[in-house]
Image (cartoon, rainbow, N blue to C red):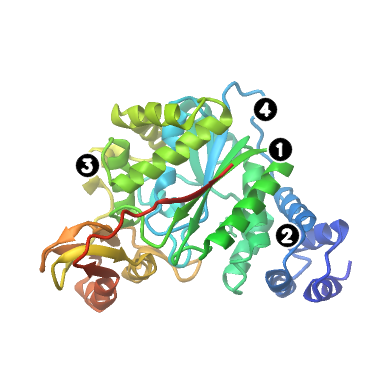
Amino acid sequence: MIPQWLIEQKRDGFALSEEDLRSFIKGFASGTIPDYQMAALAMAIYFKGMTDTEVMVLTDAMMRSGDLISFDGWNRPTADKHSTGGIGDKLSLMIAPLAASVGLAVPMISGRGLGITGGTLDKLESIPGYNTRLTTEAFKQVIETVGCSIIGQTERLAPADKKLYALRDVTGTVPSIPLITASIMSKKGAEGAETLIFDIKCGRAAFMRSIEQARLLAESLSRVGRALNRKTAALITDMDQPLGRSIGNAVEVTEAVETLKGKGPADTRELTLELTALMTVVTGLHSSVEIARGELAQRLDDGQALDVFRKMVIAQGGDPRFIDDPTALPQPGHRQWVTAPSSGYVADVDALAIGRVVLQLGGGRTKTDDTIDYAAGIEALVQQGDYVEKGEPLMCLLAKSPSQTEALLPLASSSITLSPEKPPARKLILETLD
Ligand code: URA
């Protein structure tokens, strides 16, 4: 296999053979094919796409570049939820323990935030002591005793994807449906869950900007899921506006705990219940989404899901004091309120602008090796439909110093549109695909 011939073949729009694609990925993973050739191939794939067979082969090759976790012989169904990433998306923190509280085993491999989208791993790492780097054996042990575990992609789990994702991130080749599908499904395939629920974010702050693109990605993920013998379902959910009222890392953990206490913002609770209900129905644990939703709501309200979350934090080395005292999480050096320039209803909260504000406050990364300020972010953010009087708060910016918040006041203010008319209710779930 001559790497440049493959690149040329894809550049000219031809399908690659299984043998060639497998040896290219093997060469890239082992270091015999350099990053520049992989980047060139990724760009050719970005422009020319891939056939279903090629996507499947690419997924399989990346999945088999590391360990395959197996839950064969377990007496509980295994299921996981994967989100394509958004602003304020802390749903994994509630969904994993909630699903475990009704009897599912949830192995969850999560990612870090990059660009404006937040990452579950960074949120968890704001918890003092929480270890996101468990060995495969320890990961399975936590799932067995607690019911769920959330960790990061280790060196042994789909390492070809880890390497390729980092390369795509700096070569403008992330938003490609074949590459996203292979990236997500190689990790999910290696992780071993039998049921996979996808939360495809759609809107101005998501990779998929249009419903058509989101649908194509959902279909592509489901096709590969079926080929890997997994049960799948997907929701396409709104990412024009942020989820919840807290955006950042430590503040999102606090909002997740509130939701696990049966409180929290309505949108956050609703999507938690919908996605977990889909998980329990697809695994066969519940016979309908309505029945599932009822039981799951009870588990949020009576503290059983919170109990599982507490056990998971302790099992992974975290100090659980923040569950009863949010100040045990990293705290900002400075708080700055942003106030309404006039009275009116909140007609729109621009998730893209909010994501940019949080990133620049220090809550995200622009490069993979940037360090995060876990305390940075936004809290008490208004939501569409809220009414505010002139001078009342729209949000509170959290940062290390006044100079950081001062510079971001204009962008933060302009992210909120006020209107004299009450806007229609926000549609959170745009489509369900089973
Ligand atoms: N999440 C992933 O794991 N991979 C992608 O390519 C995009 C989102």
The amino acid pointed to by label 1 is Asn
Q: Quadrant of residue 379?
A: bottom left
Numbered disc 2: secondary structure = helix
**Circle 4 or circle 1, nearest the eye:** 1
Q: Do the residues bearing badges 4 and 1 touch, measured as CB atoms within 8 Å?
A: no
Is label 3 in contact with label 2 (beta carbons under 8 Å)?
no
* C-alpha separation, residue under disc 1 versus residue under disc 2: 25 Å
The amino acid at mark 4 is: Asp
User: Which of marks 2 and 3 precedes in the sequence?
Assistant: 2
Residue 334 visible to the viewer: no
The residue carrying pointer 1 sits among few (fewer than 14), some (14 to 19) or many (20 or more) residues within 10 Å by Cα, namely: few
Q: Position of residue 421 (x, y in %)?
A: 21, 64
Q: Quadrant of the C terminus?
A: top right
The numbered disc on residue 325 is 3
User: Which mark sits nearer the N-terminus, 4 or 3?
Assistant: 4
Disc 1 target residue = 229
